[in-house]
Image (cartoon, grey):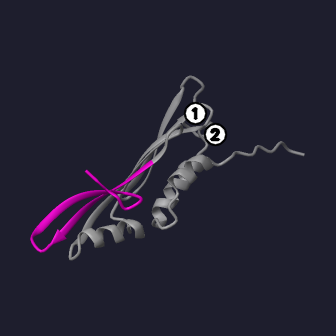
Amino acid sequence: MPEVTVTAVKYKYLSAVNNKELAQPVKLLERKAAEFDIKNSEYYDDEYDEYSITFYIPDRYILATYNNDGKLLRTAERFKNIALPLTVSKAVAKRFPQWSIPKDVYLVTYEDEKGATKVWKLLLKNGDKRLRVNANEKGEFME
């Protein structure tokens, strides 16, 4: 029988960044970063300790860093104008009634030892007034 190699998907990363409510493009890019196999890629060379690989589609990207064993060490992720999770949209509606959200940016930073930090940067609009606020995944506003 031929030799079979099984590569584990980076479940630690996927569980850290997971939000079931996020848009499909976010989940798609995060899955691609988790499934990427640096050792079988054209970029692999025994001489390097780390590799930075970018996964992107318009207005959305993930910059992922892997070690030479293929372990996902960290990511920097940016997604523009995606649907907000219910916790964030409810928090905005409660604190800023009558305000709309014409623009948003979802930022994720992941580190293998620390997990993921998720922030939504929101532009709020009410008539001629504009306001920028940041919220975390729990719908808590950050200064």
Residues 140 and 110: in front is 140
Q: Is residue 138 left or right of residue 66?
A: left
Q: Main secondary structure of the magenta part?
A: strand
| Kind of residue indicated by mark 1 | Tyr
Callout 2: 10 Å neighbours few (<14), some, many (20+)? few
User: Residue 39, how many percent across, how many down?
Assistant: 63, 36
Image: 73 above or below 141: above
Residues 93 and 119: in front is 93
Q: Is residue 72 left or right of residue 96?
A: right
- As drawn, the label of residue 44 is 1
Q: Residue at x 41, y 70 (%)?
A: 86
User: Residue 61, how many percent across, how many down?
Assistant: 41, 52
Q: Is residue 15 left or right of residue 136?
A: right
- As drawn, the label of residue 92 is none
Reply yes or no: does residue 130 show up in magenta: yes
Residue stretch rendered in magenta on the structure: 117-143
In the displayed image of the protein, which residue is found farthest to the top?
47
Q: Residue at x 54, y 26 (%)?
A: 49
Confirm or deny contact between disc 1 and disc 2 (CB under 8 A): yes
Image: 10 above or below 79: above
Residue at the spot of label 2: 40
Reply yes or no: does residue 136 show up in magenta: yes
Q: Residue at x 46, y 63 (%)?
A: 25
In the displayed image of the protein, which residue is found farthest to the left?
128
User: Residue 76, how many percent across, how many down?
Assistant: 41, 45
* Residue 60 visible: yes
Q: Secondary structure at mark 2?
A: helix
